[in-house]
Image (cartoon, rainbow, N blue to C red):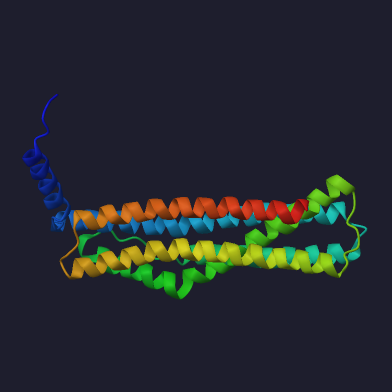
Amino acid sequence: MKAIDIESLKSAWKNEQGFENKTLSQSDIEKFLRKKSRDITQLFKKGLGFDVVLKSIMGASLIGIILLFSDNLALVISMIVLLGLNLWAIWFQVNMYRRIPQTDMSTPAIRSSLEKRIQFYHQHYIKSLYIGALSNVLVFVSGSLYYFYFKYGEIRPLDLVDIVVFGTAIIIAFVFGAVIQIAQHNFQVKQLESCLQEIDEDSITVLTLKEQRNKKLRLFFIALLALVCGLLLLAYFVFR
């Protein structure tokens, strides 16, 4: 059996540690900033674009509910109100999309471009995350009503318990969506702010980037778990 060379292992470990603790060069920093600038811009655009598409689908879904329950005046009025709110939300998100700062990849402007995006997030974009959480409510309400229609063919009058349960589910859907989205975006922005601070202090290393990738991966799995829990909770309220 081949003997383990302890000294070689120690040397390899030290070399790896030395590489990870190596401060990034100016060229590496510029590449990193360009990538972060593209990433955060895509984060904003994809988030808003997805929500506009989802709300458009929900708008069509609400119109379908109005047609299916045309003899239920109270429900029709409620759906018209929701449809109007949805149209306003789509307008808000489209307008926010247009306000995303333009990307400037020239070397002297990369840093200021990222700072503008961070400022844009805190001052403006975060509002769109609350608007985005409205989609959760629309999905829940629309899905519930379609379920009741195809299973029972009608919506029975709601008693006090039904109203409390349905209202609680709507609040949970909104809060859940808002908390998850804000947590995800705050994580991304805080990582960027931390990197910019380390760049100012000339202390950003390969290890810093590696740790950020690991944290991002953990957040992804946490968000995935939260999504599964949310879907299970939705199923509980709809099919109970």
Indicate the quadrant where residue 70 lies.
Answer: bottom right
Q: Please say if 116 is above or below 155.
A: below
Quadrant position of the N terminus in the picture: top left
Indicate the quadrant where residue 122 lies.
Answer: bottom left
| Front residue of 77 and 205 | 205
At a point 24% along the width and 58% down the height, the residue shown is 208
Figure disc tally: 0
Is 18 left, or right, of 150 in this rendering?
Answer: left
At a point 13% along the width and 55% down the height, the residue shown is 22
Where residue 118 sits in the image (x, y, percent)? 37, 69
Residue 60 seen in the figure: no
Where residue 114 sits in the image (x, y, percent)? 32, 65
Residue 123 seen in the figure: yes
At a point 35% along the width and 70% down the height, the residue shown is 116
Residue sticking out furthest to the front: 1
Residue sticking out furthest to the top: 1
| Front residue of 10 and 167 | 10
Where residue 9 sits in the image (x, y, percent)? 12, 40
Indicate the quadrant where residue 28 lies.
Answer: bottom left
